[in-house]
Amino acid sequence: MRMLRGLAMNWFMIIGAIVFWLAAWALNVWLAKRYPHSRAVRLFVPVLFGVTLLVLWEGIARGADIPTVLLPPPSMIWEKLINSLPILQADFMQTFVQSALAGYAMGCGAAFVVALLIDRSPFLQRGLVPVGNFMAALPIIGIAPIMVMWFGFDWHSKAAVVVVMCFFPMLVNTVEGLKASDAMQRDLMRTYAGSYWQNLRKLRLPAAMPFIFNGLKICSTLALIGAIVAEFFGTPTVGMGFRISTEVGRMNIDMVWAEIAMAALAGSTFYGLVSLIERFVTFWHPSMRRT
Amino acid sequence: MRSFFPVLTVIAAIFVIWYVAAAIMNMPWERDQAERAKAEFVYSTALANTMSQERPVLPAPHQVAQEIWKTTVEKKISSKRSLVYHGWITLSATLLGFLFGTVLGMLLAVGIVYNRAMDMSVMPWVIASQTIPILAIAPMIIVVLNAVGVSGLLPKALISTYLSFFPIVVGMVKGLRSPDALQSDLMRTYNASGAQSFWKLRLPASMPYLFASMKVAVAASLVGAIVGELPTGAVAGLGARLLAGSYYGQTIQIWSALIAAAALAAALVAIVGLAGKLVERRMGVNR
């Protein structure tokens, strides 16, 4: 009898989740048709979609009795996340703040300076840009074992991987951006007798900003990925990549998901922050206009 | 052709820097050896030796080239030590994942362009999905799928799929929306149906965007396949080669796997670029 009730409960959960999904879908379609230009709807529709995914996940994971080793339900992951905040914080400090942020700053900074330098020589530009483009497409993550050998197990080797990963996308974008000002504007600066530095500061750098921020945004996601994957090749016993690979080995999948949730949160926040700064710096660009 | 000599110069400079760096970085070991053997440290012989160490800190380019030659041409293709064998395993996962990713990305893009609710609800999550560092979850996906009984090519291909569908969706949506009002109006005056204007206007117009994204996607797909090989316990594939090399301190092996991966990436991007040119010519896209 109890088993039967349990079974009914399971079916109830699955069907409930699916009904919720269909209802949310219908609501979304209706909202999108009815208020296509309202700001609130624009925010609400994707949020509802996300909530639906979570409900569907929870309902099916619990209802179909999927072993938690395979796919733990979101509520369980949330519980684990709350209960192991100190560990998560230590991992976060090691991987994100020390490896990813340090590497990001150094890689993007170095690429920016090199771009300014090669900008003065058309010969170097023609030579370095194709090579940089080529390098940006390579699986650079593969240098992780080499960096671990050179710089040791601690965060320095991870930061080095991040530096190399960020360098080429940033270089290519900055060089591209420095060419973005058009001839008319440059001629105007010439008639003002602007020096090289005035030209750079008042015209070319502002014009390059959309490109530079494009590079910064690409690198912000690359940095976290680089830092985490580099930890698969050897770390001290702390760090997000280390935690993920060891907890997978111990089949603590809920802990892995908690770590992933935090990585996603950190990654999105970082990306969002860079986009926000972009909004302030390049407010004049057409892509920033409200539609 | 204008940039031929500059590129050549830069590449030559890279090689020079590489040799100098190899000499500098391998020197401490030579010095150490000489001290241990109580032999006199002769700078010129030490310098020559830095170019041919067994396990150098940084192998010289010709050592890597020799290793690649040895493991591709001189070994049988079926041998476990052949780079061609490992490269093929990585390549097959890459291609399968790339295929899945392209199909999925194109379907999603068509849905997003033709369905407003999907545009509003799916698009933000497609973007958000990329903030999850999938490469970091790769080990979990492999292990979990292994536990379910799916192993071999498919788990790696799934990781590649996840990485490659995103650029395709973004590029394809942009491309399908690229025909301007004038062209859509022309289709309307022809009384074209929705399907006709899709096949005859939107799809051909999206091709340049699609192929530009496919170049990015195929490179991402290769990265996915390589990282997907890391946690499988270093069995086969270029990623496994990297991992095994780092366990045993075989730097030359790491570098040769790295160069092989780079060559593979370059070849794949070039092939996609060439296919793009052919399709665009066929579709009548003029540049």
Image: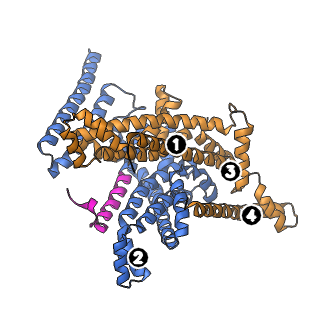
What amino acid is at disc 1? Ile
Which chain is disc 4 placed on? B
How packed is label 2: few (under 14 Cα within 10 Å), some, or many (20 or more)?
some
What amino acid is at disc 3? Thr
**Residue B271 - label:** 1
Element on which disc 1 rests: helix
> What residue would you read off at disc 4?
B28
* Marks 3 and 4, the one that precedes in the sequence: 4
Magenta span covers which residues? A265-291
Element on which disc 4 rests: helix
Query: Furthest residue to the left?
Result: A34
Task: Estimate the x, y position of residue B258 in percent, counting from the top left.
Answer: 61, 48
Query: Furthest residue to the top?
Result: A1
Camera-side mark, 2 or 3? 2
> What residue would you read off at disc 3?
B251
- Quarter-wise, where is residue A161 in the image? bottom right
Number of marks in picture: 4
| Residue B97 seen in render | yes
- Quadrant including the N terminus of chain A: top left
Which chain is disc 3 placed on? B
Task: Estimate the x, y position of residue B237 in percent, counting from the top left.
Answer: 60, 38
Question: In this structure image, what is the colour of chain A?
Answer: blue
Who's orange, chain-wise?
A: B
Relative to B249, is B262 on the left or the right?
left
| Residue A75 seen in render | no
How packed is label 3: few (under 14 Cα within 10 Å), some, or many (20 or more)?
many
Which residue is at the front of the view, B80 or B6? B6
Residue at (63, 62) in percent of width and height = B14
Which residue is at the front of the view, A117 or B2? B2
Which residue is at the front of the view, A60 or B79? B79
